Image: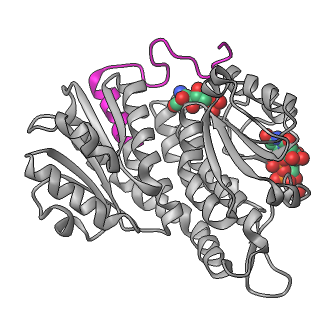
Amino acid sequence: SKGKYEHYMQKEIHEQPESLTTTMRGRLIRDGSSKRKSVLLGGLKDHLKTIRRSRRIVFIGCGTSYNAALAARPILEELCGIPVTMEIASDLLDRQAPVYRDDTIIFVSQSGETADTLNALEYAQENGALCVGITNTVGSSIARSTHCGVHINAGSEIGVASTKAYTSQIVVMAMVALAIGADSISTSQRREGIIESLLNLPGKIREVLKLDEEMKDLARSLISEQSLLMFGRGYNYATALEGALKVKEVALMHSEGMLAGEMKHGPLALVDENLPIVVIATRDQCFSKQQSVIQQLKARKGRLIVMCTEGDAEAVCGGSCPVIEVPHIVDCLQPVVNIVPLQLLAYHLTVLRGYNVDQPRNLAKSVTTE
Ligand code: UD1
Ligand code: M6R
């Protein structure tokens, strides 16, 4: 039931502090008698050695599940030192792309029933790869057909727009990276820092949810726009893609997420004083590059909305544009925090524009046909 909420999407956005807590429950454990914590994923522990020996890791998914994998890719690359490639399920099949016996293929799916992902799984099985599932639905086709995997335990998701599953998927994939990389001494401090931040994450989500009213006001200012662009990079390239996917699928407004590093290679031509552009510029290794993107967009009179770290409003745009200030967390978990205001924005835009929030036209929760 929706409880005190008007829509499932709204409820599912607001329950993320709890769903993330459930996702992590029993999986961050104390190392022997020491104070240190490590990750225990029951479904993967017997397969970690095989995964560490694989030649590459391939993520496969569709829609939001693909975006979640994209958000987790950098931490997997960093902690595992194995090349990680990304595949949209239908595209892998269209190309009949090479898949090898020494590949680890991770299938990401909330429902566990998406036809494209299931077909890609069958193809990877035929080619002898180790197939790992990251699913929210126990007993689903993908959970049953993979060699091993991890349930994200986010609780059932009813709104067609995936919200709480996205954040739980990223957290599970970060934990997968920690588990695969657990045999490395050189990254142990980095891993401890991430585990510490995982424990603080539900509190940060509770904080960022306080932006609800602010996002409603921002939605009001965008209600009759034709289009909304989102620029991100690094860990937050995925945030731009996922924010734009939410806006297009529920608010029925054209929206594109773009890699900020590609701006000069085409999208810059679209910039004028009318087209609203969300620029994600929270503090991480990409911050100074994003600051220079903001300067370049301002020089072309771009209409910016900047997402930045709390206290950075002045630094990022000198008070000259609307800002979304979010709490800071370790880089690889920042996309979990950053997506929340964009989920709220898409939700309020949809309600204000008078569209169906939980059942957008032409879409189904689970896409069981090609
Ligand atoms: C499991 C139990 C959980 C219990 C916990 C206690 C289940 C579903 N989970 O959780 O109730 O509290 O032990 O130790 O009974 N799998 C796949 N593909 C997927 C997802 C999972 O093959 O896409 C497999 C895993 O490899 C594993 C099993 O399903 O063998 C359960 O996975 P998961 O629920 O993530 O395991 P635990 O967290 O250990
Ligand atoms: O159940 P899955 O995660 O496999 O679904 C994949 C996509 O169909 C799904 O994420 C879709 O993009 C959502 N409607 C996005 O909100």
Magenta span includes 348? yes
Q: Position of residue 56 (x, y in %)?
A: 72, 50
Q: Position of residue 116 (x, y in %)?
A: 67, 22
Q: Nearer the viewer, residue 51 or 365?
A: 51
Residue found 36% across the figure and 50% down from its top: 232
Residue 130 visible here: yes
Q: Position of residue 87 (x, y in %)?
A: 61, 36
**Image-quadrant location for residue 144:** top right
Residue found 84% across the figure and 87% down from its top: 33
Q: Nearer the viewer, residue 3 or 220?
A: 220
User: From the viewer's perspective, is 107 left or right of 337?
Assistant: right
**Image-quadrant location for residue 61:** top right
Q: Residue furthest bottom?
A: 34
Q: Position of residue 258 (x, y in %)?
A: 35, 41
Residue found 78% across the figure and 30% down from its top: 121
Q: Is residue 349 above or below residue 212?
A: above
Magenta span includes 25? no
Residue 221 visible here: no
Give the total of numbered labels.
0
Residue range (magenta): 343-370
Image quarter hosting the C terminus: top right
Q: Main secondary structure of the magenta part?
A: loop
Tell me, what colour scheme is on the image? one colour
